[in-house]
Every structure is written in structure tokens, then in C-alpha cells.
Image: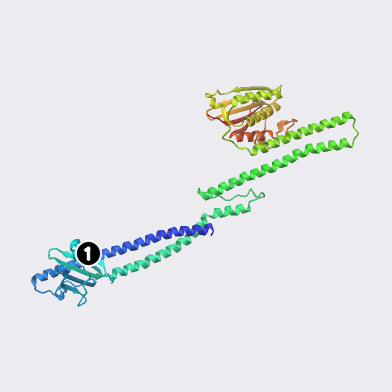
Amino acid sequence: MNFKLRFALLFTSFVAAILLIACTSIYFLYATYREEDYYSRVQSEGNDLFEIYINLKQTMPSVTQDDVLSLHRIELVNEQMFILDKTGSVLFNLGVQKSPKLPVVNLDAAKTKKSIRYTDSAGNQIVISYKALQKQFLVVSAYDRVGLRKVSTMRLILAGVFGGSLLLTAIMAFLFVQQAIKPIVELSNQMQRTNELNLSERIWVRPAKDEINAIARNFNAMLERIRKAFEFRKSFVQHTSHELRTPLAVMLSQTEAALNSNYDVEGYRNVLMSLKEDQQHLIELTNSLLLISQNEQMEFMDEWPYVRIDELLYDTVAYFNKSFPDAKTAISFETMPEDDAELLVKGNDALLKAAFINLMKNAYLYSDDQSVSIRLITDHHKISIKFQNKGNQLSPEEAEKMMIPFFRGTNVGKKKGFGLGLAIINRIVQIHKGELSYKALEGQLNNFVVVLPVKG
């Protein structure tokens, strides 16, 4: 059974239960009201006849049915009245039959309760009352033909209303469910159609703010993330193939040239030196690609210890200066922390150190004066680390693409590189739940900012 039919049947069942309870309640409430109302009429009629009988008894020695009927006609269907003495003997009876049958009477119960009501097997409603002043029992019975007919009609009407309402509910439920789950059907169809060739196709989302439209919006957002991931992978593979193919082609051509030529020792030495440079180039590229691959699968870990950023930066600068002795690196605080906790970042010190070294290396290589300025700004929730250098700036269009692997801006000139550094740095910062941004400042200043959450 599909979801649409199951939901429609479930909704119809709930409505059917409510309708059944409502119709049954109406029927029994009306039947109870009819019964109580007719008991009251039977008792009132009996009291009127009993009063006439008592008044006539005071003026004549013997009272007959005709005497009573001459003053008050029988108004109820199958109406019968019996007056019994305290022993249960019939003193007077009135009815359509000449020899009416006395209903079952419990004299003791009637005397104790003053009044008893019940319905016999023929549907006659009987009221037994004890008249304490006369020490007599009044028994009155009648058949509510009109009331019972109304109850029967009411039963047919309610049954029709229940059946018609149930049928209408089933139709409306099916139509409602069909419209309600239409986005889900579209979502299912989209899932069946979705592959790597049509990731740009989206489900139409209605303006309504409901759960199904939220699912559609989330599915579209998921498709967008998958599309970007596929495009990234595709671009990454294409650039990687290109970057690897170039040095391999150069190495092959140099090897073939050496095999087809008769170089002297110095000539072969030059060829080998050139091959060594290409091999080192390949090793650096392979290491960078491996680092990106490792970081792509790494996520933030709660068990990482807290690292003091200023101390890590000082260690990183000391290590960097050994590799680049002519670099002019300076660390300063734009705002002094009020608490040491504002300098504590939960993270992996090796990864953070690798990111900072890459930022300093970029600032050094593309600086006009080999100067690198590192400035720290702290507050209670995050710490901002600025890496600044003076040199050619990136255009706004280039700044948007700088995190893409293998992308290199026009400011690189003839400097060697792969365009992987910022992609690696950005991934490391993201792992630590931070942000990396770039802004071109006045005075040809390049400003890279790393923002990381702190313990404070």
C-alpha cells in the first residue's frame, strides 16, 4: 500500500470514528430525551386521571370508565390506568381494552421510591406512583408511537449522514493527500532523474512555509552542494592532470634528447640536474595534493587540546626565519587580551602551524620588501590574525577564486607555484571552525585574515 492511499485511509478512519461517535451520541441523547419526556407525559396524564377519579369518588359511590372519560378523554396511545389499594388489588382501571392486563408491580419498591419507571417488552412505558394520602398505587402505561417513529427516522437520517459524510471525507482526503504529497512525488521523481549530468535541475518550491516545502528546499540545497563538490572534483582532476602532465612531458623530452645525443660529462650532468628539478617539482606537487586529500576527509575533533595562538605564532615565525633568513617578520597585538582564555584555540597545532607557514610564505614571496606583518585582534569569542604584506594586489574577481585549487592570480609574475596553498590553508581553517578572508587595503597592502573561535 502506497503512502498516499495509506494516509487517505488513516485520515478517513479518524473522521469515521469522530462521525460515528457524534452520530451515536446524538441518537442516544435524543432517544433518552424522548423516553424521559414521554415518562413525564405518562405520569402527568395519570395524575390528571387520578385526580378526576378521586373527585368523582367523593360524589358518587361507584365510578366507571365512562364517568372519567366524560371529563377527560384518553390522549395517549394504548393508554391504561390502574388504581390499586395497599394490598395490590385493583380498585379501578381505565383503558382501551375491556379487560386490561395489569403490568408487573413491585409494591414495596414503589412505596419506598414513591415512583418507578420502566418499559415492558412491548415498548409500553409504565409509571408506578404511590399516593401516600390515599394509600393507593397509581399505575399508568402508554405507547409512544410518534416518538418512537421519530427515533427510527432519526436513526435513518444519522445513518445516511454518516455514510454520505464518510464517502465525501474519503474523496476529499484522497484529493487533499494527492495535493499535499505532490512535492514529495516531485522529490522522488527528481531523485530518480538526478545524476552527475543534471545536478543543476531543481524542484520548484512553493512560497508556503510548511514541512514538505522545507524538505524541497533542503533537497535543492543538497543538490547545490553536490553540484559544487562535483565541479570541484572535476576541476581538481583536470588541473591535477595538467600540472602532472607538464613536468612529466618535459622530463620525457629531456630523457629522449639525452638518449639521442652524445653529450659530454658536463652535458649529461646538466640534463640530470634539470631532471632533478622537475622531480622535486613533482614531489612538492604530490605532497600538496596529498595534504589536500587528507584535509578533505578530516573534521573537527572535540578531544583536540587548547593551543595558545601567540605562542604557536612565535614558534612558527622562528621556524620560518630559519628557512627564509632574509624575511622581515613582525608580530604585534592590535588589542591586548583581558584574559589568557582569549588566546586559547581548540585545534591541531601541526595543522595550524602548516597554515600559518603557508600564509607567511605567500606574504614573503609576493612582497615588495620581503616583509611580513602579523597582527592579532582578540575579543571574548574569537581571535583574528592578520597577515599583511606590501605588493601587487588581487582584483575582486581574483579574490573570489583564490580558494580554488590551482588558481593563481596575475600578481604571481614568474614565481613558481601550483596555486594549492590557499586551498590548503582554507581547508585547515574550516576544520577549526574558522574563516579565511582577503582584502586589498590602501598603500598596496594585501590583508589575509584568519578568524578562529577561542575558549573565552
Q: Return the x and y of residue 392 as percentages of the image width and height.
A: 69, 28
Percent of width and height locating residue 144: 27, 69
**Along the viewing direction, whichever of 439 and 114 lies nearer the viewer:** 114
Q: Nearer the viewer, residue 299 or 394?
A: 299
Q: Whole-percent x and y of residue 207?
A: 52, 49
> Farthest residue in the bottom direction?
98
Q: Could you tell me residue 372's position as x and y percent?
A: 66, 24
Q: Secondary structure at mark 1?
A: strand
The answer to whether residue 18 is left or right of residue 432 is left
Total numbered labels placed on residues in the image: 1
Q: Quadrant of residue 452?
A: top right
Residue 357 appears in view: yes
Q: Residue at x 32, y 67 (%)?
A: 151
Q: Amino acid at mark 1?
A: Ile
- The residue beneath circle 1 is 116
CA neighbours of label 1 inside 10 A, class few (<14), some (14 to 19), many (20+)? some
Quarter holding residue 87: bottom left
Between 148 and 172, the one lying in front of the other is 148
From the viewer's perspective, is residue 236 above or below residue 173?
A: above
